[in-house]
Image (spheres, rainbow, N blue to C red):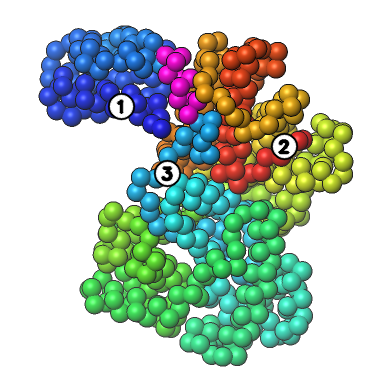
Amino acid sequence: MANLEELLHQRLAPAFETVAGAPVDPVIRRSQRAHFQSDAALALVRKIGGNPRDIASRVVEAAQLDDLCSSVEISGPGFINLTFSDEVLARLLADTIGDERLGVPQAKAPETIAIDYSAPNAAKEMHVGHLRSTIIGDAAVRLLEWQGHTIIRQNHIGEWGTPFGMLVEHLLDIGESEAAHELSVGDLNGFYRAARVKFDADETFKDRARKRVVLLQSGDETTLRLWKTLVDESKKYFMTVYGMLGVRLTEDDFFGESYYNDQLQSVVDELDELGLLRESDGAQCVFPDGYKNRSGDPLPIIVKKGDGGFGYGATDLATIRHRLRNLHATRLLYVVGLPQHQHLAMIYDVARDARWLVPPARAEHVGHGSILGDDGKMLRTRAGKSVKLVDLLEEAVVRASAVVAEKNPELDEEARAAVAQAVGIGAVKYADLSTDRTRDYVFDVDRMVSFEGNTAPYLQYARARICSIFRRAGVETPLQGIEKLVIAEPAERALALELLEFSSLLAEVSETLEFHKLANYLYGLASAFTSFYEKCPVLRAEGDVKQSRLALCDITARTLELGLGLLGIDAPDRM
Ligand code: ARG
């Protein structure tokens, strides 16, 4: 099924072309005055002269929109205002009743997409930045997979850099079993801090740490075994966090920095052969064009350090080459905090200079802001420590449980626990995804779990309420035998229009990965449903009208369920 914009586009594009004598994009968008509008006649005047209102009416004449629109108006200086007829809305919606995909088409050109997300650092607590990356990345995985793309999940955990020298030495100091114990109970920060304190205070420890990194990166067996203890315990811990969050990341998705170790030297060699490598302060560097530090000097990506070690830049270069050359990905997404924007832009530029990244393949930084505490600063505990993610998630579930119990005292304990889980975790995810990802937001559990406002529980509840309409009516879903809908009341029309916008909205979000637009869409849909349900009786209606309204309820519930599902949020049937 074509979406509404497409239907208009298919008619207006050729009509504009007839009038202009050359292809013109009709630029169709939602309108305040009508359903849609096209303003392209205005811009056309500069090309072909004449009067824009006159051009607009010639276009309308040529487009022959009578079978789609109940009204086509030329307004103002030459806008074309377009309103779909009720019959067309009814017919298009009727098609979605028997359709699992709710009228949303599969991607026309499926791609292989590598998504780099979550990426916490081993032997260190996951922080709220990793929470954002995990939630946004998971939504990207779900949406793009559902559109029919092949998704490669890449959890680029940090486990190969300089800190691992110090961490392995600290592990030796306290003994392997004690270290394993500390890490397995999730005291990652304690372990890291203790190592750091020694590193800063004790020159001999510092020296041992430096030597240990070199041993590690050159493959010394004992060092590797000790290092693996650290990394494995951390991975186990990360898996419990992913389990709580209900994201799709698995054990098999860990492709940490170390995965690229044996490709690093070949990156150096290849860049050297291409003439891109330059020595600077003893290190091997690449200087992509146009990046300067504060004093105006060119900024490097350090590929190989003076002491022979490799760092974050080198691994990222190996990673991008691997994803393009070996995994054959054509779209690379990096879900990483905004402070790393310049680093990633430089990596992409080097990859372009090296001809690894060649269009149509593209790399995109899906950047995100921070999560703040209610003081407006980076989220910290009262004692000033960084907040543990699991604590935040547990708190959200506990609060959700209280709110759910109050809202629905009839739920038994087991059902309540399940709903509280869906609501608490859903609330945390939704608060994140409903904010423009480039902005910071305040972590406010009370607001997140509230049933009022633009929150997960509000949307989950809107859907659960529809489920209860069907239970009360004794009607089984999916509905059968409904061939035609009746759209006659303004609230029906508004709801129908909203429902029919789902597919173009998803197409947009799969390009921009601006999940707040999907969230806002769902919120708008739930509000349109609420007005519809207030104004149009469903169970008390009769005949075709009743059937049609039940169908509107069903399509709304399924759209909410699917939309929330694409955001990684469960929708309980009762709550
Ligand atoms: N581990 C890094 C951090 O915690 C994020 C890695 C992002 N991915 C990448 N390919 N650089 O900041």
Give amino acid for label 1. His
Q: In this view, does 29 lie to the left or right of 220?
A: left
Kindly indicate the quadrant of the structure image that contains residue 241. Answer: bottom right
Numbered range of the magenta stretch: 85-95
Element type where label 2 sits in the image: loop
Give amino acid for label 2. Asp
List the residue tagged with mark 3: 106
> How many callouts does the rendering have?
3
Element type where label 1 sits in the image: helix
Tell me if label 2 and label 3 are in contact, CB under 8 Å.
Answer: no
Q: Distance between the residues labelled 1 and 2?
A: 38 Å
Front disc: 1 or 3: 3
Q: Position of residue 214 (x, y in %)?
A: 50, 85
List the residue tagged with mark 2: 573
**Which quadrant is home to the N terminus?**
top left
Q: Which residue is drawn at 64% across and 69% down?
A: 235
Q: Where is residue 383 in the image (x, y as percent from the top left)?
A: 76, 55
In this rendering, the answer to whether 560 lies above or below 140 is above
Give amino acid for label 3. Gln
Q: Which of marks 1 and 3 is nearer the N terminus?
A: 1
In this rendering, the answer to whether 365 lies above or below 168 is above
